[in-house]
Amino acid sequence: MTTMRQYIQTSPAKAKELLAKLVETSDNAVKTRERLLSELKKELELFNQLEEQYLFPVLQKHKGTKTLVAEAINDNEETRKLLAELEGMPADSEEFGSKVSDLRKAFQRHVRDEKNELLPAILKALSDEEAESIISSIEGQKAEMEAARRREADERRMQAQREREQAEAIEETAQNLTSSVKAGAENVEKIARTAQGTVQNGLGAAFDVARSSAGGLMAMFGLAGPRADRAQVGTEQAGKNIQAVVQTSTVLMRGIQDVSRECLEMSRDRFQRNLSGFTVLGRCRSIHDLIAVQTSFIRGNLELTIENSRRLAELAVNVAQEATQTMYAEETDLGVSVTQRAA
């Protein structure tokens, strides 16, 4: 077991080491100074607290050590004051280095006084049993405080690790979703363009066939007599039919082009919305935030899908109505023309 002499002589060792390192730092070593100062404060607070809680109350009961205890308490207060001043000033200032030197001198004086004056008085005033009881209490409390400090440090490391893992998971999710949306948008655009090209090619071929048929029918105008009249009526009827098909096809082609453009615009709009959503996902730092953002993200996409489906359905209905009206108008004109020719 540690003796009173060993405790007084060895306890400030770590604080001395930290002070020596802090004095040697330059004004540019801001992070190092802040870290060393934080560690030094914890070490000095632990040392002072243990003395004031277990050692000084016993020494105050003895006449030979009462005055020395008051001086030691004043030294501890001076140490706390200098630490508070250091925490309140910039770590890159010359004043910081000067204040560290003041703290080091004050602490060295305190340690020297305890070794040269307080320790001999303690050994003279206290019995071996009292000294052992104080040291036992100090070491037990110190072990508990250091264990609590380690648990706190471990918890901070675990929390930091969890936050890093959550951030990495969120970033990976956002990247995967971004890639999926990009690929989906590209596929939709490719399909729409392919469909549009197919329709245009098909209608072009239909127009060529219609022109050829019209040319063949017009050659029948060279016939004479009643057959020529019937041929001319047949030719006009065929031309009207071709014209109706061509005009109706033009309406359908224009409608399909409108639907294709609408699909492209919808895919671009969805892509932009998703990118904005991924930006928000990237800022999430907890599972709760991630779930809330994902719920809102999914709900927004569902609403957009419903609205896009409604819009496309309206376009399809409009195209069908316009094509039907065009065909009906052409058939009406054709009927009137044929009736007049027959008369």
Image: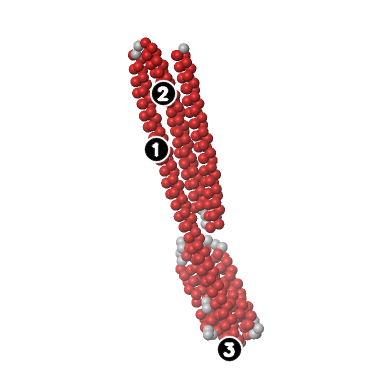
Q: Identity of the amino acid at label 1?
A: Thr
Residue 174, percent from left and from top: 47, 52
Residue that protrudes farthest toward the front in the picture: 226
Sequence-earlier tag: 1 or 2: 1
In the image shown, does 5 or 306 lie closer to the viewer?
Answer: 306
Q: Residue, x 46% and y 28% (percent of image)?
A: 251
Query: Mark 1 touching mark 3, by CB under 8 A?
Result: no
From the viewer's perspective, is residue 335 above or below residue 99?
A: above
Residue that protrudes farthest toward the top in the picture: 225
Q: According to the image, label 1 marks what residue?
A: 194
Query: Mark 2 touching mark 3, by CB under 8 A?
Result: no
Numbered badge on residue 242: 2
Residue 89, percent from left and from top: 54, 62
Sequence-earlier tag: 2 or 3: 3
Q: According to the image, label 3 marks what residue?
A: 128
Sequence-earlier tag: 1 or 3: 3
In the image shown, does 185 or 343 lie closer to the viewer?
Answer: 343
3D distance between C-alphas at marks 2 and 3: 123 Å
Give the colouring mode of the picture.
secondary structure
Which of the two marks, 1 or 3, is nearer to us in this view? 1
> In the structure shown, which secondary structural element does the residue marked by tag 3 occupy?
helix
Q: Identity of the amino acid at label 2?
A: Ile
Q: Residues within 10 Å of mark 1 (few under 14, many from 20)?
A: few
3D distance between C-alphas at marks 1 and 3: 98 Å
